[in-house]
Amino acid sequence: MRKILLTSGGLTDHHKKLFWNNIKKQPHEAKIIFIPSAATESDGAREGISMMIYKLMEMGVEIRNIFVYHLKYLLSADYNRTYSREVNDLPPAFRLLTVEELCEYDAIFFCGGDARLLMDEINRTGFHEVLNTAVANGLFYVGMSAGSMVAAGNFDDGLYYISNPITVHCEKGITHSEIVPNEEIFLSDNQAIWISGNTIQIIE
């Protein structure tokens, strides 16, 4: 069953409680994939990577259980390898993970930053295909800002876990929990979209 949490400003205490209730593991046992690829173009953006790692550790996730998976390191899906053609045992950080490998983790976190850059990297590498299957199989997807936008209807080539485009970091967010298909959703930093199976709702 799909478990998807799309946040604007990160996880509030309520969001964290929902996360752990669905993971059903102690924090020190949880295994997390962290995708930093939206936030590598400036020091201001890279600072967000540091803070998200810190927040995960603050939640009780052990650093040895956080796999940083930077899509920039991966070859393009349509690239025809030349001198590395015979190499088949690259470490996971430098190749496209399989669905089975993704599903060995409890959750995948996408940090904020440049949503268009992140979307391009997801599609360039072919990561969208394995990711979509893993999420459908129960891998918990957590997006923050840009990580939420790529999962929504913001881009024609997006993941489309929800058809609505999302505007994040709004001073005043959506004021009702009912979501109208395809209608733009404005999220304040204490709000999130929670998708459980086919049920979609706004939470705070």
Image: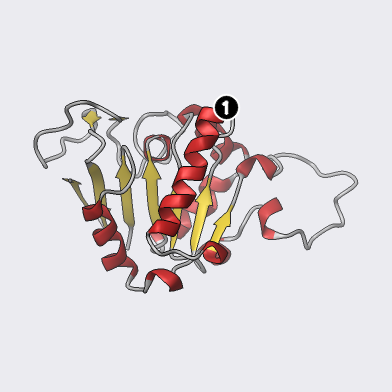
Q: Is residue 161 visible?
A: yes
Q: Residue furthest left?
A: 176
SS for callout 1: loop
Q: Give the image location of residue 102, x and y in percent.
A: 53, 61
Residue 121: name its quadrant.
Answer: top right
- Judging depth in this view, the residue of 86 and 58 nearest the camera is 58
The residue drawn where x is 42% and y is 34% is 146
The residue drawn where x is 29% and y is 29% is 169
Q: Is residue 135 visible?
A: no
Left-right relation of 55 to 101:
left
The amino acid beneath tag 1 is Ser
Left-right relation of 61 to 22:
right
Q: Give the image location of residue 141, x and y in percent.
A: 39, 53
Residue 173: name its quadrant.
Answer: top left
- Judging depth in this view, the residue of 86 and 104 nearest the camera is 104
Q: Residue furthest right?
A: 83
Up the image or down, 106 lies above or below 37; here it is below
The total of numbered circles placed on residues is: 1
The residue drawn where x is 43% and y is 65% is 106
| Model colouring | secondary structure
Q: Give the image location of residue 139, x and y in percent.
A: 42, 61
Q: Give the image location of residue 93, x and y in percent.
A: 67, 54
- Judging depth in this view, the residue of 164 and 58 nearest the camera is 58
The residue drawn where x is 25% and y is 44% is 193
Q: Which residue is mark 1?
A: 42
Up the image or down, 31 lies above or below 85; here it is below
- Judging depth in this view, the residue of 106 and 129 nearest the camera is 106
Left-right relation of 198 to 45:
left
Crowd around label 1: few <14 · some 14–19 · many ≥20 (10 Å): few
Instruction: Locate the N terminus by quadrant.
Output: bottom left
